[in-house]
Image (cartoon, rainbow, N blue to C red):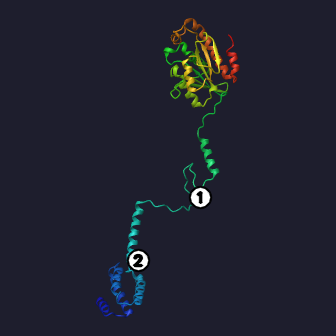
């Protein structure tokens, strides 16, 4: 049969039905023995006959052969290739293979979800999706602000800080320079306050509620000359105004047993008050001066760093009691001028 096909080709046979019959016979024979070879044989025969058939015959033959063979070629067979489409189909096949490989290694975008609203995956809490309006943004900001811890709003009448000045350590406990510490310790006993060392405050700190007000007690551990560092840290932390602060300090200009309350004034040579004034950048803060008596010129340092004498200790208990009551009066009465009148009255 193949020899008859060659003879027809060499003689330039013009009978289209004859050629189709020969082609189909050969193709069906080969395909029945070698599945998948139909496309290759058809391409070879089509190329050899291209120069012998007229344009019209080639078009008719190609169309007929393609249609008829599609009925017989197995579904798993190769594509039917022609001389005009082989190159483009090869490139398309290569592109398909490349796409297939890239899908295995590169995540592809998922199609848009068509799930109903009730089945839509939940988003992270607090992260709005889609379009947002001004009201939505404001509501979200309000929710965050509500959940975020806010600093306490403090005022002079409800939140007060009492500071006692002195030097830390047992060696200074009963010295005149630690009169402020002694008053604060006595006040803490009466109010049931326990001090705790707070490194953030650079001092010992305790707090309580007294007469409906929040009271903080502070003993700086910076030593006297740097007391302002501790006071500044506590004021900044609690956002307290200067009018809510009362500093208890020893005073050599007052006789032993006397006390004086002032809302402003100079440091008077006291290094602790100088430090506070320097860190607060102001002289306008309340101070309660505890009289410890003066000393001869040139002996002031030894005097303030020395312990109370035996005679002075007899007065010390009353002095501390009067000072504590003065502090309590200042806490209870919002009018400091009235408190000054009572505290500073001759005794």
Q: Residue at left 59%, top 10%?
A: 316
Q: Quadrant of residue 143?
A: top right
Q: Give the residue at mark 2.
A: 75
Query: Horizontal placement of 231 versus 155: left or right?
Result: left
User: Mark 2 packing: few (<14 Cα in 10 Å), some, or many (20+)?
Assistant: few
Q: Quadrant of the C terminus?
A: top right
Nearest the camera: 188 or 338?
338
Q: Residue at left 58%, top 52%?
A: 128
- How much space separates mark 1 and mark 2, taking CA atoms? 43 Å
User: Mark 1 packing: few (<14 Cα in 10 Å), some, or many (20+)?
Assistant: few
Does 212 appear above or below 290? below
Does 135 appear above or below 163? below
Residue 95 locus on image (x, y percent):
40, 69
The residue most toward the left is: 3
Q: Residue at left 69%, top 13%?
A: 345
Residue 75 locus on image (x, y percent):
41, 77
Nearest the camera: 250 or 63?
250
Helix, strand or loop under label 1: helix
Residue 53 locus on image (x, y percent):
37, 90
Helix, strand or loop under label 2: loop
What label does residue 117 carry, if any? 1
Residue 196 locus on image (x, y percent):
53, 25
The residue most toward the top is: 311
Q: Quadrant of the N terminus?
A: bottom left
What label does residue 156 carry, if any? none
Q: Quadrant of residue 49?
A: bottom left
Disc on the earlier residue, 1 or 2: 2
Nearest the camera: 253 or 258?
253
**Residues at discs 1 and 2 in contact (Cβ within 8 Å):** no
């Amino acid at each position: 049969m193949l020899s008859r096909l060659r003879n027809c080709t060499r003689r330039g046979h013009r009978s289209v039905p004859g050629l189709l019959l020969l082609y189909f016979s050969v193709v069906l024979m080969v395909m029945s023995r070698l599945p998948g070879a139909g496309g290759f044989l058809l391409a070879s025969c089509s190329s050899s006959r291209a120069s012998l058939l007229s344009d019209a015959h080639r078009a008719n033959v190609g169309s007929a052969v393609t249609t008829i063979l599609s009925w017989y070629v197995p579904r798993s067979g190769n594509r039917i290739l022609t001389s005009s489409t082989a190159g483009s189909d090869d490139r398309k096949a290569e592109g398909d293979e490349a796409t297939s490989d890239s899908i295995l290694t590169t995540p592809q975008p998922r199609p848009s979800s068509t799930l109903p609203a009730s089945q839509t995956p939940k988003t992270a809490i607090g992260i709005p999706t889609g379009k947002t309006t001004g009201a939505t943004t404001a509501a979200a900001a309000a929710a965050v602000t509500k959940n975020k811890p806010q600093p306490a709003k403090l005022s002079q009448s409800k939140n007060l800080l009492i500071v006692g000045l002195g030097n830390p350590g047992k060696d200074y406990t009963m010295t005149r320079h630690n009169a402020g510490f002694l008053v604060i310790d006595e006040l803490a006993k009466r109010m049931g306050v326990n001090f705790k060392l707070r490194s953030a405050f650079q001092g010992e700190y305790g707090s309580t509620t007294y007469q409906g007000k929040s009271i903080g007690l502070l003993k700086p551990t910076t030593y006297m000359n740097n007391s302002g560092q501790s006071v500044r840290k506590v004021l900044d932390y609690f956002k307290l105004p200067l009018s809510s602060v009362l500093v208890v300090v020893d005073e050599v200009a007052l006789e032993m047993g006397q006390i004086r309350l002032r809302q402003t004034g100079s440091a008077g040579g006291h290094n602790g008050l100088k430090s506070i004034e320097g860190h607060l950048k102001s002289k306008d803060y309340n101070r309660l001066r505890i009289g410890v008596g003066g000393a001869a010129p040139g002996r002031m340092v030894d005097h303030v760093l020395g312990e109370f004498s035996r005679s002075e200790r007899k007065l010390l208990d009353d002095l501390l009691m009067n000072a504590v009551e003065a502090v309590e009066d200042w806490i209870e009465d919002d009018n400091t001028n009235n408190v000054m009148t009572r505290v500073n009255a001759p005794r």
